[in-house]
Image: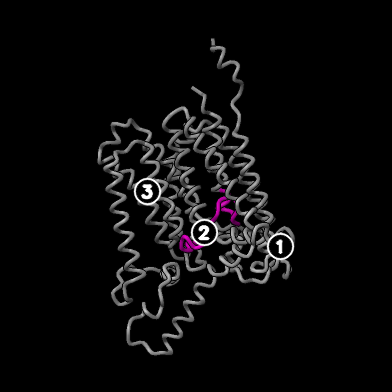
Amino acid sequence: MMPAYIQNEGPPRVDRLQLLAVLGLMIISVAFVYSATLAVESSGTLAWYRHSYFKQVIWFAVGGCAAAGICVADYHALLRWSYVAYWATILTLIAVIIPHVGSMKNGGQRWIDFGSFQFQPSEFAKLAFILAQAHFLSRPVDELRQPRIFWQSIGLMALPFLLIMKEPDLGSALVLAPTGLVMLYVAGVPGRFLGQILGTGALLAALFIGDMVFAPARYRIVKMQDYQRERLMVYFGRDYADYAGDGISTAKRRQLREQEFNDSHNIRQALIAVGSGGMLGKGWRQGRQNALGFLPQLGKPNDFIFSVIAEELGFVGSVLVLVLYSVILFSGIRIAGQARDRLGKLLAVGVVALLFSHVFINVGMNIRIMPVTGIPLPLLSYGGSSVLGSLIAMGLLQNIHIHRKAY
């Protein structure tokens, strides 16, 4: 017979506060995807059901159903398939970089085109990595002190990281590192192991930035797309003419500085949009940077959706968005603390670290504290893969919360 305190608890409930925050971000997303795309889409002959904001509603509905479905089964049952999901996404990451399979867009080969839907494997590879890493690290703490186990866990992170870099998609690859390292720390991996990997990573990052940004072109070792190197140079304020070295003509120097000015256009306009919003903003669909096309047309509903919101809702609207994200993240931390076992705790921590990394990098690049990397803002940016991945992540957190008291 069940103890009275268990009988009186009733069925476990979802985290309503987190759900309200998610719903709030979804409403804001639809409103500002509409605002960001209407000037372009309404001038054509698109039917209403082909507009971006309506597609966003459809993806929210599909993602909501997927999240609800994830909540049905105990997360232990889901994690039995974690390695299957991991290797399936690895295969899709390999497929997307194969010529004539992956679709090239904006300088990257990151999508598989299914006609009405472009599938971006990296969005799902990040979630599959969290599932596999949580499963792998949920072993007894004594085993985590073995170097072999540590390097195997690093290998789980390195494989999707390198494949995503190959696309190339620097932003999506970068979020794997903090996510994986936070999970290692929470799992109880010895500090000396983490110190070694952090030290090695910092050294490699310094060498990479020095090579890409400060070394003359003829001495450069790392090969990257021109647009990626230019984004880094803009972020660090490097003069294109100085980078080209001595001996260039005055005309060439002028051309390079004009190119530098053009390459910094997007982030410059994003900063203007954020700053011009003032306290209360210019009003929905009244932002000049948005309506007059100064913000990049392709990037407005995706990478620069935060700038659109900041211009039209001002400082108050920006803070509202950050508060909603804070509710989701802090409730996720609470869910991790209440999880009934290490497996649930690690899974929740991984999801929270992933979401935080996305938010920090995207908002950071809109206000120029981070370089532009083309990473979506969860639950706000337009895009089917991003929306589905974000809502599946929310479903995983709710699953852990619902089953926190099951034995």
Residue 78 appears at what percent x and percent y?
49, 35
N-term-proximal mark, 1 vs 3: 3
Name the mark nearer the viewer: 2 or 3.
3
Q: Amino acid at mark 3?
A: Met
The residue tagged with tag 2: helix, strand or loop?
Answer: strand
Q: Check disc 2 and report the residue beneath it.
A: 112
Q: Check disc 3 and report the residue beneath it.
A: 157
The residue sitting at 64% across, 40% down in the picture is 20
N-term-proximal mark, 1 vs 2: 2
Badge 2 crowding class, 10 Å Cα cut-off, few under 14, some 14 to 19, many 20 or more, is: many
Q: Which mark is residue 269?
A: none
Q: Amino acid at mark 2?
A: Ile
Magenta-highlighted residues: 362-388
Query: Is 146 rendered above or below residue 358?
Result: above
Q: Check disc 1 and report the residue beneath it.
A: 285
Q: Amino acid at mark 1?
A: Arg
Query: How far apart, in angstroms, are the residues tagged by discs 1 and 2?
Result: 33 Å
Residue 218 appears at what percent x and percent y?
30, 77
